[in-house]
Amino acid sequence: MPKIQDVGNRIRFSVERFDGGYNTKDSPSEILPFDTPDCLNVQFDIRGSVQTRDGTDKWNTTSIGTSAIDWGISYNNTMIVWSNGAMWKNSGPTGTAFTKVTTSSGKFATGVAVGAIVYQNILFCSDGTNGPWKYTGGESFYNMGIDTPSAPTGASNGAGSVSTGTYYYAVSFVNSQVVEGQISSASAGIAVTSSATVRLTGIPTGSSLAGVNERYLYRADAASGPFRRIATLSDNTTTTYDDTIANGSEGKSPILDGTKPDAFKTIEQHQERLFFDSSEDRTFIRYTEVQNPFIAPGINEEPISSGDGEDIQAIASQDQVLIIFKKNKSYGIITTDPADDTTWQKLELPANYGIIGPKAFTKVQNGIMFVGQQNWRITGLHFLSGIRLQETSDGKLRSLNISQRIEYDLLHYMNESLWSSIVLNQFQNRLFMAYAYLGSPRNDRIFWLDLNRLGYEGEPGSWAPWSGINASVIFPHYGYLIFGDSTTTGFVRKLTPGVYNDSGSAIDSYFWTKQLAGDSEGQIGSYVKDLRELFIWFQKLGSYHMNVRVRVDGDTSAGVAYPVSLAQTSALWGSMVWGVDPWGGLQTDFDERIPLPGYLGKKFQIRFDNQNTAGQAFRVHRIELGMNMRRRRT
């Protein structure tokens, strides 16, 4: 809290920290002393300092095309991004060059966000219409599900071990993960009049996208089965086979329902199953078999308030609960035993909030944060724990209040037509929310939230708005936070600590204090004061200046600027000038008195900025205002 010293008619009012964050809910004079009514491109540290945010560098030095980045993910220490209708991969954890996965060309719609997940060391993805696909590295890009082949043909051919009768044959494909798909339809009956060999011909092969490693052959004495395995073809090329397997020597039964997963917009791994929406009917959730992500039997589906006119928007998982978000409501499926779906419980979340878009959520410790919607309007940022909106651990902060301080911006400064493009992710206990500012045709702003302060002394974290980063996707990769450009540049960028520019462009970084009246109860605030001096504690970051500005009583101008040098100083024996240079080694933290000509007013605002210059920053720890008391204004 602020400190007040009363020395005669001189008031010393100090603000010890600035990490309350951005607050437009209350007036600039009513917010807390460490809040800010106006800031841009700043961040806060655990000690309460405010500083210019970290900058960004291009990750790929060469553009991958003239389209936006549609999505991105880290896979096996390789960065994967989607752009221009294809997948692109870089060369290892820190490789800066992207190459196209040529087998993926034309398999994705340009400008459409991709649903993607890594499970069992395989990347599964779809744009909601095309696919779904699986990727295992290199050029290994195939269908996620396993195709059902056509039936083979054949005839009896000479002596052999197959007894007299009529036989039917079928085939199944086996993928590179040695998982079998659904058996084909039966061939026409092949009559054997005496013990013979049956030659099968026209055995189907898989397409280039099928990813077939081998095929199983089956035989039955009726078209309806039961079929039993008679052979394995360990390739995807052989089209003939001579059946000499004696009756009674057949092997295993086939997969009768190997239905493939549908194209999806959203997908989540939960207790060894993959859950996804279905392009066939987006009011249904479908799911794969336990530990088998390639098959989603027809019975593995669950209607989610089917017929209410709302499609499934997003799916998230926490503990034993699967959360299914729709536009204006949400559901939880409790899966105590993931292998037995007859024991699952489905219920509508009592908070009755939906989600604004398929990427508008992120997992945090003990829960999920998401941008909610009710009655087709944004309701704010919510924290979901279990199957209901929870209080935070200190018992003071309800999730509805997490975004209360930025509510005005959420309701008035977000492009409503692009709400569905909002993207959330968290990195190093900070939340990043990319959105389109009012009138923008793409995501061009970020809200940054310090989760370390979530619930701290009853406070809902520390917010700060950022500009200069156009992010269609935000994801971590190899210890970096990555932003994919929403503009048509074909670049991805990384957040880079200590770099105070965005690929060479200046970061417009500033911070206004609240309107400081000289106390927090309002007694001194009713007096006119004469602001005579300002003490500032700051860090010397480089050989340049920051601006400190002052304005009075609700003035909306930029204020009067007082440049402060941030150059590190040192003066050692034999080089210093007595009475001019400071004595000692390099000084990084510093305090400075700024004499003022005298500002008469009841309330004063102080601003720090980096002069909107590339490579420049500021970091301020605390300030102290020296004021003379004048009179009570009536």
Image: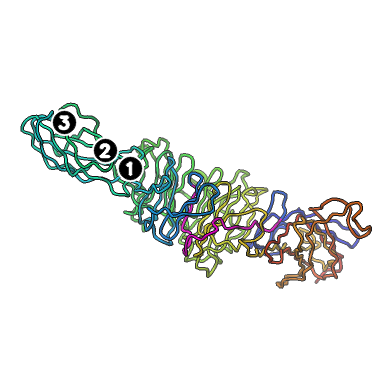
Q: Secondary structure at mark 1?
A: loop
Percent across and percent down for residue 554 are 72, 70
Quick one: label 1, few (<14), some, or many (20+) residues within 10 Å? Answer: many
Q: Is residue 67 magenta?
A: yes
Relative horizontal placement of residue 52, taking residue 568 as reference (left or right)? left
Q: Earlier in the sequence, mark 1 or mark 3?
A: 3
Q: Which residue is mark 1?
A: 295
Label of residue 255 in the image:
2
Q: Which residues are magenta?
A: 50-74
Which amino acid type corresponds to the residue marked 3 in the rendered image? Answer: Thr
Q: CA distance from mark 2 to mark 1?
A: 10 Å
Which residue is located at x 77 percent, y 66 percent? 604
Q: Is residue 124 magenta?
A: no
- Mark 1 vs mark 3: in front: 3
Percent across and percent down for residue 238 are 23, 41
- The answer to whether any part of residue 56 appears in the image is yes
Quick one: label 2, few (<14), some, or many (20+) residues within 10 Å? Answer: some
Q: Which residue is mark 3?
A: 244
Quadrant of the image occupied by residue 395: top right
Q: Choose between 275 and 175: the one closer to the eye.
A: 175
Which residue is located at x 60 percent, y 47 percent? 428
Which amino acid type corresponds to the residue marked 1 in the rendered image? Answer: Ile
Percent across and percent down for residue 210 are 31, 47
Q: CA distance from mark 3 to mark 2?
A: 23 Å
